[in-house]
Amino acid sequence: MERCPCPCPCKYFLVEKCKYGDRCRYLHAWSWSTDFSLLTPLHGHHKAITAILLPSASDELISSSEDGTLKFWNCHTGECISTRNFDSEIGCIMSDGPWLFVGLRNSIKVYNFENNTQFTLLGPAGLVYALAAHHDMLFAGTQGVLALQGTIDATGQSVLCYSVNDHTVRLYNLPSFERRGRIFAKKEVRALQTGPSALFFTGDGTGDLKVWKWSTDKGCNMQC
C-alpha cells in the first residue's frame, strides 16, 4: 500500500486498533518531525493530565490529573516517587519559588516546601483551570483553555508549542513562525512543559505523559 505523503496519523493507530499494521498508508507514530523524538512515556495517571511542572533547582517532575492525583517523578529514573490524593479533580498546578499551588474545585491548595506548611484558599467558583503569580499576587481562572508553552530547542532557537482541539500540538519557530512539526495524541493535550537539556513534556486526555527531546540537527522545513 502506497504511503500517504502528508503527515496524517492513522486514526486507528492512535486508538491501537489499526488492522493494517506496517502496511497502513498513514503514519504510525506519535510525532512527525526530524527535530525531536519521544524519549519515554511516564505511566501512572488514569484520566486526563491537566498540568506538568518542573520546578527550578529540583530533580522532580510534578504532574496533575483529573483522577484527583498529584504525582512526583524522579527526573533521572522516570520513577513515580510519591502521590498525593485529593477529593476533587485537579484543574491545574503552578509553582513559584518554594510554593506549590493546586487548582481544585472551588478552592486552591497551597504548599510551602521550605517550611512544610500548607493551607487552603477559598473563593473560586468552579474548577480552577489556570493559575498565575505576578508581583506577589495570585490569579486564578475557572474557564478552561488548551495549553500554550514557549520553549528553546537544542540550538537555542525559541519555539512556540500550542495544543488545539484536533488532538495535536503544533510547534513553530519564533519570531518567524516557521513550522517545526506536530505531535499527535489520542485525545486533546491539556498540559505542556519545557525542561532542561532540550527536553519538553506533553500530557493528554487519556493520562499519557510523554517526554520529548530536541535533536541537535535541524531537519527540513515542514510544509504539509
Image (cartoon, grey):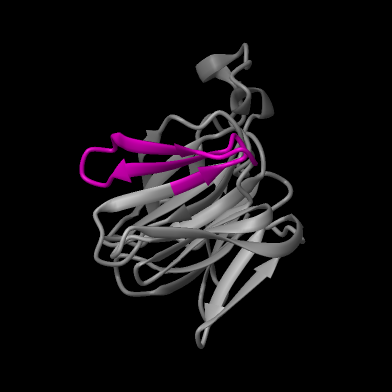
Residue 102 colored in magenta in the image: no
Range shown magenta: 63-88
Q: Please provide percent x and percent y for residue 26.
A: 61, 30
Q: Please provide percent x and percent y for residue 17.
A: 63, 15
Residue 76 colored in magenta in the image: yes
Quadrant in which the N terminus is drawn: top right
Front position in the image: 183 or 199: 199
Residue at the outermost top position: 19
Residue under the image location 59 percent in, 19 percent down? 16
Front position in the image: 41 or 111: 111
Residue under the image location 67 percent in, 62 percent down? 122
Q: Please provide percent x and percent y for residue 131.
A: 60, 67
Q: Quadrant of residue 154?
A: bottom left
**Vertical comparison of 13 with 81: above or below:** above
Would you say 220 lies left or right of 154 here? right
Residue under the image location 21 percent in, 44 percent down? 76
Would you say 198 lies left or right of 51 here? left
Q: Quadrant of residue 87?
A: top right
Residue 219 visible in this rendered orientation of the protein? no
Residue 107 visible in this rendered orientation of the protein? yes
**Vertical comparison of 100 with 189: above or below:** below
Residue under the image location 50 percent in, 32 percent down? 45
Q: Quadrant of residue 40?
A: top left
Would you say 203 lies left or right of 144 here? left
Quadrant in which the C terminus is drawn: bottom right
Q: Please provide percent x and percent y for residue 197.
A: 25, 60
Residue at the outermost bottom position: 135
How many numbered circles are shown?
A: 0
